[in-house]
Image: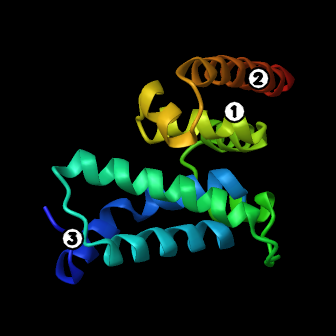
Amino acid sequence: MIIDMNSLEPVYEKYKDNIFAIGFNYFKNSIEADDVVQETFLKLARSGKEFENEEHLRNWLIRVAVNECKRVSLSSWVKKKVSLEEYTGQIDFETNEESRLFTAVMSLPKKYRQVIHLYYYEDCCTAEIADYLGISQTAVTTRLLRGRKKLKEDLLEVWKDE
């Protein structure tokens, strides 16, 4: 399957939220996350790449989004940032637990936040995450374990206080 200008819109609609979530997870603000979405889909439109199937396309988009996050983070350009609290206030969570979980995940150090997001929200396996981030599978597994442990500690504290 080749993505051209006619088939770009359905792909955009299907994956824009996933790409935004990757960018938001990396930068903790919506402005850079929107830029990551825009750049990722611009690269797709310009690529002329042929994809074997939907899974190949999805993996390509995730890889490009992660690489775009890395590229933007190296840039010296400073943009207006929206605070995490301000952005969290704009999201309609179904329950207080979802809100707390989101806040807890976003408060993790970036190295744990990235693997937690890719594993649980994007359904990537540890081998894919290792490939996307350029780290070993062992490092991914370790980061997942430490991230889960930190989340458990943080969330238990909040729930004990209630």
Given residues 111 and 95, the one toward you in this image is: 111
Of the numbered discs 2 and 1, the one sitting upstream in the chain is: 1
Residue 2 disc label? none
- Sequence-first tag of 3 and 2: 3
**Residue type highlighted by circle 2:** Lys
Q: Give the secondary structure at mark 2.
A: helix
Q: Which residue is mark 2?
A: 150
Q: Quarter-wise, where is residue 123 in the image?
A: top left
Residue at image location 57% in from the left, 25% down from the top? 136
User: Which amino acid is tagged 1?
Assistant: Tyr
According to the picture, the residue beneath numbered tag 1 turns out to be 112
Q: Residue placed at 59% from the left, 31% from the top?
A: 135
| Amino acid bearing label 3 | Ile
Which residue is more in the foreground, 39 or 103?
39
Quadrant in the picture for the C terminus: top right
Q: Residue at x 72, y 26 (%)?
A: 151
Q: Are marks 2 and 1 in contact (CB under 8 Å)?
A: yes
Among the two numbered marks 1 and 3 on one chain, the one whose residue lies closer to the N terminus: 3
Alpha carbon separation for disc pair 2 and 1: 9 Å
Give the number of the disc on residue 3: 3
Whole-angstrom CA distance, mark 1 to mark 3, is 33 Å
